[in-house]
Amino acid sequence: MSSTFSLAGTTVSRLGYGAMQLAGPGVFGPPRDRAEAIAVLRTAVELGVNHIDTADFYGPHLTNQLIREALSPYGEDLVIVTKVGAVRGDGGSWIHAREPGQLRSQVHENLRNLGVDALDVVNLRWGGGSDGHSAVPGSLAEPFGALADLRREGLIKHLGVSVVDAGQVAEAQSIAPVVTVQNWYNVAHRGDERLIATLRDQGISYVPFWPLGGFNPLQSGSLDAVAKRLETTPNAVALAWLLHQSPNILLIPGTSSVAHLRENIAAAGVALPADALADLDSLAEDR
């Protein structure tokens, strides 16, 4: 299976980097170690990562400012994907902010803090649900249409959607081209398998978040056993499994540690034999 895929017209490594953990605890406030955060970003690019996922509500603002400090001027093959649709309240609360005026303000904040004239990709973050990670019913036509207007103005190059269902993806596509979808999907939670296949056939990337999220103790124990047998870590197994599932899956594991970053990137080389895949397949809850 290929180690690269096309995102926003650029060939990117399927193993990217998610910048969320560069902020402080709860994705709020400054990083614990600013120098290490800068080193993580620079090391990621040095190791071949050219897809970085971020949002101006990480921090807020601080993560994008770190990316600018560490990596600007940006390489031509670097794709920075950001998200809008939320802001942070006092104390770090997450607040939906999807009115057209709010989205325009968020886009301009991303532009300013990343130091660019146009954003490579902007995802509309839609859902959340009772678990904070699932799609919720409703039409995203108005907010996505507002982003499509900003795309026509030249402030955004490409659009994507996050925390959505298949119907909402189709609704967004009826308004403007969608180049990526970002949802919760992992070895234990596989509700998006049909959507992933549909996007694959359309040449659209799918970016799963929370690769180790929502596991019950039995699933975690089984994953640990596979990792021990392969002499690697559960995180590496979970990431390798995702890469194995479909060529349009792009990963964005996050970390604030250079050592952990190197472990994540090494996961791309972890081979999963048939018996390991069979054990992992048995973990699915929603098949």
Image: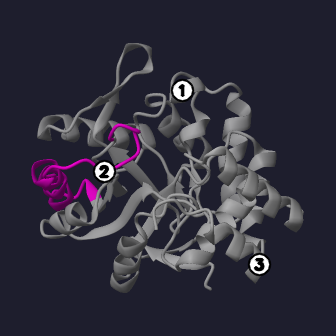
- Name the amino acid, label 3: Asp
Q: Is residue 145 magenta?
A: yes
Q: Which residues are magenta?
A: 129-156
- Name the amino acid, label 2: Ala
- Name the amino acid, label 1: Gly
At a point 19% along the width and 63% down the height, the residue shown is 172
Q: Is there CB contact under 8 Å for labels 1 and 2?
A: no
Q: Does residue 109 sit above or below 233 in this rendering?
A: above
At a point 62% along the width and 76% down the height, the residue shown is 244
> Relative to residue 26, is residue 271 drawn left or right?
right
The numbered disc on residue 135 is 2
Question: Residue 284 location, x and y as percent?
Answer: 55, 63
**Of pointers 1 and 3, the one earlier in the residue sequence:** 1
**Of pointers 1 and 2, the one earlier in the residue sequence:** 1
Q: Determine which residue is flagged by label 3.
A: 275
Q: CA distance from mark 1 to mark 2?
A: 22 Å
Tell me if I can see residue 118 in this picture. no
> Relative to residue 189, is residue 84 drawn left or right?
left
Q: Which of these two is toward me, 187 or 63?
A: 187
Q: Determine which residue is flagged by label 1.
A: 26
At a point 15% along the width and 64% down the height, the residue shown is 171
Q: Does residue 200 sit above or below 78 in this rendering?
A: below
Discs 1/3, front: 3
At a point 47% along the width and 62% down the height, the residue shown is 207
Q: For label 3, count other residues whose C-alpha is less than 10 Å away and answer few (under 14), some (14-19) or many (20+).
A: few
Q: For label 1, count other residues whose C-alpha is less than 10 Å away and answer few (under 14), some (14-19) or many (20+).
A: few
Question: Residue 6 location, x and y as percent?
Answer: 46, 77
Which secondary structure lies at badge 2? loop
Which secondary structure lies at badge 1? helix
